[in-house]
Image (tube, rainbow, N blue to C red):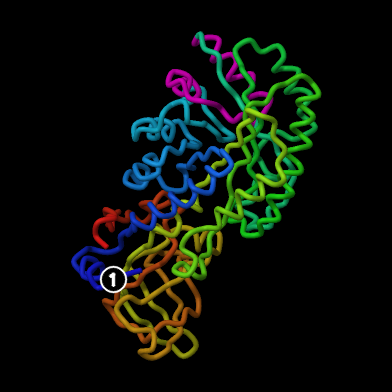
Amino acid sequence: MFSKEILTGFGARKTPFYYYDLELLHNTLAACKRAADQYGFHVHYALKANFNAEVLKSVQSFGFGADCVSGNEVKKAIEIGFPPEKVVFAGVGKSDEEIISALELDIFCFNVESVQELQVINDLAAKAGKKARVALRINPNVDAYTHHNITTGLEENKFGINQWELPACAEYLNGAENLWLEGIHFHIGSQITNLTVFKSLCIRVNEIKLWFEERGFTLRVLNVGGGLGVDYMHPDENSIANFEGYFEIFNQFLDRKPGQEVHFELGRALVAHCGSLISRVLYVKNGIKKHFLVLDAGMTELMRPALYQAYHKIENLSREPEAGAQKYDVVGPICESTDCFGKEVELGESFRGDLIAIRTAGAYGEVMSSRYNLREQSEPFYLERTQR
């Protein structure tokens, strides 16, 4: 992944910084589009995964839509060039100001997460003289078998409308003059690597779709969310997610009528592997029981290990792997014990000044960075497609 030319470019830059391989991003987007186009599926990119401007421009160039979870994400998507008719606004806590702004921008759809939100959007649309297109985000109570903090499809989670609330939604929609029901929406979690979970989702979607159709509702859109995981352990061997297998499951198990669209909201699977966090070793602390590499990057640059106990492959770019095996706890400079990227990481013997790459950091990396401890934030570095 890291050629001599790229490493030379790294050496002249102040660390830490995010590195994006835009050629790998292009190839990933192309693979996703090919797989989705086989079945006429529509893909919206989840901006929350990474809203770096260069990344967004690449995604938009493939004709994908945008899945947004804040008013500013909606504005950013349209600013980058995503057409309003391909912008979806999701999120459990949309403010009145955000809703009004999205109405003014004539976005495609609001993914609505409660009966009360339906009422709020209907009232605001009436005041604006608009008719808002909505999809009901329904909690299917399907276990995604992923990390507890990124599971979203169980009744214990804050997301979505519970199935026992559907009659109240149907009743309200029948009388709401400023709402138009486009379809139903689901999202059960993130970093899902067991594809059979999506078969379970399809079965539940089929049941709920039938419930609405039996009550006279026409659903133009079935939005099944995203959640497809990536291989954090082997970023070079499996640098592009299994889009073929993912979309095939929905084609096989999801019932859809002629003209009924299937929408997806993919984030991590599109951008995770193209990004790495590049850092330097500040200090090597050798002890009796533990050896530490203290980096100049910390949880302020990459929050996932501290927040989710997430694994990222760590490489010493300055040393060959066979240069003497040593195990280190790779940590950052932040005044928190959770500021740790990996424990007992086997690297070659490492020294002050060595360049370290923390891989598969293109999703939920740069976007979750903070200025805690008054940390500075550096500009990303890009490998353009023409640089290979």
Quarter-of-image position of residue 116: top right
Check if residue 107 falls in the magenta segment: yes
The residue pinned by badge 1 equals 3
Q: Secondary structure at mark 1?
A: loop
Residue 108 vs 382, above or below: the answer is above
Which of the two residues, 105 or 248, is positioned nearer the viewer here? 248
Q: Which residues are magenta?
A: 99-128
Quarter-of-image position of residue 157: top right
Q: Is residue 372 left or right of residue 262?
A: left
**x, y percent for residue 53:** 33, 43
Which of the two residues, 253 or 94, is positioned nearer the viewer here? 253
**x, y percent for residue 307:** 53, 58
Check if residue 384 falls in the magenta segment: no
At horizontal 46% and vertical 20% (from top left) the residue drawn is 106
The count of marks equals 1
Q: Is residue 271 left or right of residue 251?
A: left
**x, y percent for residue 186:** 65, 39
At horizontal 51% and vertical 8% (from top left) the residue drawn is 129
The image quadrant where one finds the N terminus is bottom left
At horizontal 28% and vertical 71% (from top left) the residue drawn is 3
The image quadrant where one finds the C terminus is bottom left
- The chief SS type of the magenta part is helix
